[in-house]
Image: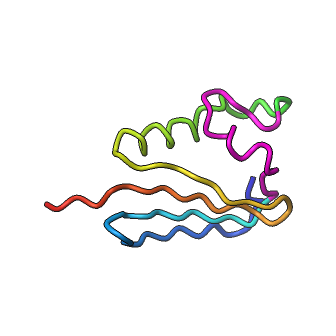
Amino acid sequence: YGNGKPITVAVKNKKNSVIVTVKDHGIGIAYEDQEKIFNHSYRINELNKDGYGIGLSVVSHVCDLCGGFAAVDSTEGEGATFFLTFPKRNA
């Protein structure tokens, strides 16, 4: 979905959380689909059979298990930015 354009990955500490940001410059995600993409087996394009629709649901589940969450900010035609947050734990 990235249209062959670069993808940026960043990690930072903020307010006792570790935030992983993944940004692409692809086709973007319609607002009405943004919440659904983290559901198991949800596929934006049902005609595209290149996967099983489980990738983002697994990402969200792992974030949940660690006490964090996954979110997306996107505009159609402008790409998407995914945010994965995890609580910072002292070693």
Q: How many numbered marks appear?
A: 0
- Residue 14 x, y percent position in the rendering: 39, 72
Quadrant of res 17: bottom left
89 lies left or right of 53: left
- Residue 15 x, y percent position in the rendering: 36, 70
Query: What colour scheme has been applied to the protein in the rendered image?
Result: rainbow
What residue appears at the point 81 percent right and 34 percent down from the top-left corner?
A: 48
- Residue 85 x, y percent position in the rendering: 44, 57
Quadrant of res 44: top right
- Residue 63 x, y percent position in the rendering: 43, 45
What residue appears at the point 57 percent right and 62 percent down from the top-left corner?
A: 22
| Predominant SS along the magenta part | loop
Determine if the magenta segment contains residue 38: yes
- State whether residue 41 is above or below residue 26: above
What residue appears at the point 58 percent right and 41 percent down from the top-left corner?
A: 56
- State whether residue 54 is above or below residue 71: above
Range shown magenta: 27-45
Residue lying farthest to the front in this orientation: 15
Who is closer to the viewer here, 31 or 48? 31
41 lies left or right of 69: right
Who is closer to the viewer here, 7 or 76? 76
What residue appears at the point 80 percent right and 44 percent down from the top-left corner?
A: 32
87 lies left or right of 7: left
Determine if the magenta segment contains residue 34: yes
- State whether residue 86 is above or below residue 24: above
Q: Quadrant of the C terminus?
A: bottom left
Who is closer to the viewer here, 31 or 2? 31
